Amino acid sequence: MDIKTYMETLGRQARAASRAMAAAETSQKNQALLAIAAAIRRDASVLLEANREDVEAARAAGLDAALIDRLALTDKTVAGMAEGLEQIASLADPVGEMTDLKYRPSGIQVGKMRVPLGVIGIIYEARPNVTADAAGLCLKSGNAAILRGGSEAIRSNQAIAACVREGLAKAGLPAEAVQVVETTDRAAVGELITMKDYVDVIVPRGGKGLIERISAEARIPVIKHLHGNCHVYVDDRADADKALRIVENAKTQRYGTCNTTESLLVARPVAAAMLPGIGRMLAGKGVEMRACPEALAVLRGAGIEEGRLRAASEADWSEEYLAPIIAVKVVDGLDAAIEHINAYGSHHTDAIVTEDYTRARRFLREVDSASVMVNTSTRFADGFEYGLGAEIGISTDKIHARGPVGLEGLTSQKWVVLGDGHVRQ
Amino acid sequence: MDIKTYMETLGRQARAASRAMAAAETSQKNQALLAIAAAIRRDASVLLEANREDVEAARAAGLDAALIDRLALTDKTVAGMAEGLEQIASLADPVGEMTDLKYRPSGIQVGKMRVPLGVIGIIYEARPNVTADAAGLCLKSGNAAILRGGSEAIRSNQAIAACVREGLAKAGLPAEAVQVVETTDRAAVGELITMKDYVDVIVPRGGKGLIERISAEARIPVIKHLHGNCHVYVDDRADADKALRIVENAKTQRYGTCNTTESLLVARPVAAAMLPGIGRMLAGKGVEMRACPEALAVLRGAGIEEGRLRAASEADWSEEYLAPIIAVKVVDGLDAAIEHINAYGSHHTDAIVTEDYTRARRFLREVDSASVMVNTSTRFADGFEYGLGAEIGISTDKIHARGPVGLEGLTSQKWVVLGDGHVRQ
């Protein structure tokens, strides 16, 4: 079978399965999730063995250490997959929720019902745990899923897929509700992202390169997360302790996450008072500061070692470092901060530190990002922290879902109209 | 200036204006809407004169009567534009609405704020009233708009644009908040639908051809309405009077609208009892029935004149006639009806006529359409009937907005996080 025919077969099967999934009862979906989790726990050694083969092949192919690190499963990550599925089972079912049913002057009653999107295509890199996670989220939200993981993880993914199939069968749900693409041919991705009749939305998970490529080529809506150039703006009405604590957490708690702060803006009136303390804290943690001339002068004056300082270039304001590096800029005040963030940011997550009511209110309204924050760390931008219970990704798009995307982001709302023989005049 | 540079200039200006629009106060936006309406009323004769030139040019170019009919303005349609803007001014402002603010165990407070999408590109045919309407909806929802109407309406659109500019200026809003593309070069559309950095969403309004072309070529999300193959399913537990009344209204109230019913499904147990009456009503109104063999036999048996009857082909089940024609099929019952609608329908609007509680509930849940109805006419699928107050279009997409799209459909929700120095553990 050629790739096109193979993918169309998956698509047609997924479309058919999506009808059954949309009508499935909550208890059935939960039963499937728990059965998949149980199968994963029971078959942990099978999964680890398949994964070991994937890892060996990746090593033999000379793939880089970071990829192999993401690819490798351990007892702990396998248990984590099962726990994740159990957590998804415990979440409220978003499907079928009816809201806002109101009578209209015509006599009809109009409201909305939350419904699955249909068929979701998920494309990700060589991270086998995404297979379990994505399958669980799609299943609970009543969607059918076509999963296409990195080819290096093919054996691991197929082992996980076997557990998924078993769980679906136990709950009486169609086997095609979750399909793992079984070819490593890259043409499969090209088909998946253009099969408009069979796939309703694409969710790519992975590096910026993967996501840009998929967005450029997809003929289907994409829920995407491009990158995170998050800001903390320390206003001249900021509390100095909170500013220090928030910058520390936002920049240094973890360097490699998309909600890590990459740019620090400080209002001119407090630059001399607050930047030295913040700069010393950052330098002490080994963070390099790429600063505007004004910030650089203040930081130097505060005696921060030259090795931690560097003049910022224009490119630094747009950078997602994912490393112990931060861009630092002194700005006039709130207006300049908002303008800078909207111009250079990635519309992901941005925070203001201020005690000023009106400025906090303006920052919340005028910063055009998926998450806007007052006096908190950008690190909070996360589905679990927001109470979504799970997260399929973080969207930097404006359409459909912005920010952390949970079960609700995998659904839509249709209109429900109830009458009693009513006709339009 | 070449088209690319010209469109990028519009895009850059729109992006800048969108920041001011997002922060604009409700009263300012309403003031602008009312001032535009007043200018349109005052300059009615100017608009009609510009429109007369457009119509003459269209006639001279030999364009078809239907196009000229849509192009031509009258005193009444000009007054209608002004009234539409006044109505939009009276609607609640969706922007800035904060909902669901909840405290999380970490101590942060998390909720959502409704915000404009940013820059909306609207592409439509030679209907000058869309210029006023679209400008008003984008303005009220805090977005900047780039409007590209059919080239045949260029003089009318520029006359309306002058009124829009005057209204924006009076309210102190940026002139670039609503820009009308001033070239009739088709390349402008190609630029508009691919300027990712400057345009957030495209709303095409017009025929299926226009929308398919734009969807295929756009590199920006499109809120689109493709076509409406709406169904009425008469269940075997239907009330015969309601069935007759609903089919009559759904099919014959207006033939050319997207929410007009194009397919009638009748459950076998009541086909002999209910189809004859429905058939006679339809025949009496001059509607041609394209029927499956079983329905054809019943209709013939009821003495309906042969000239109104025709055997349905497979293509009829997918057709949007927009004419006094209806496809008629006898089905086994609810399951077959749902399957037929999901397979052949356009996911627009579908109704069941039944007195059966469980079947009504199943139809609502399992029919995968933007609007699902019980015991009402599909003609109700409309922004005004649903209480949206205005409508930019009807979406047959599943992502973002389904069904009638009002002001809310031109907005999105961002996350708002409030803290007091909170950091992530």
Image (tube, coloured by chain):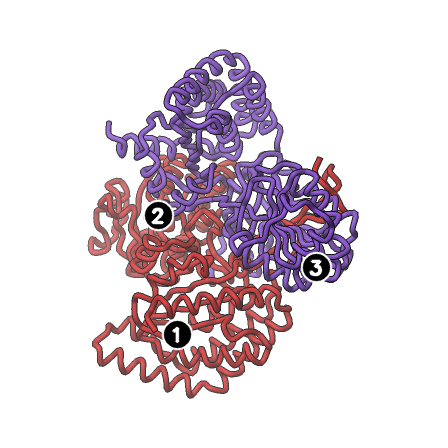
Chain colours: A purple, B red
- Circle 2: element type: strand
Q: Can residue A217 be spotted in the picture?
A: yes
Question: Viewer-proximal residue, B264 or A371?
Answer: A371
The residue type indicated by label 3 comes to Ala
Q: Quadrant of residue B106?
A: top right
| Mark 2, other Cα within 10 Å: few <14 / some 14–19 / many ≥20 | many
Q: Where is residue A93 in the image (x, y as percent from the top left)?
A: 58, 34
Residue name at image x 26 percent, y 55 percent: B288
**Quarter of the image that includes the N terminus of chain B:** bottom left
Instruction: Say whether disc 1 or disc 2 marks the residue closer to the N-terminus.
Output: 1
The residue type indicated by label 2 comes to Leu
Q: What residue is disc 2 on?
A: B264
**Quarter of the image that includes the C terminus of chain B:** top right
Question: Viewer-proximal residue, B259 or A375?
Answer: A375
Residue name at image x 52 percent, y 14 percent: A44
Q: In this view, does A142 lie above or below A28?
A: below
Q: Specify the subunit that label 3 lies on.
A: A
- Circle 1: element type: helix
Q: What residue is disc 1 on?
A: B128
- Circle 3: element type: strand
Residue name at image x 22 percent, y 81 percent: B60
Q: What residue is disc 3 on?
A: A267
Q: Specify the subunit that label 2 lies on.
A: B
Give me the C-alpha separation between circle 1 and circle 3. 48 Å
Which of discs 2 and 3 lies nearer the camera? The answer is 3
Q: Position of residue A113 (x, y in %)?
A: 54, 44
Residue name at image x 39 percent, y 53 percent: B247
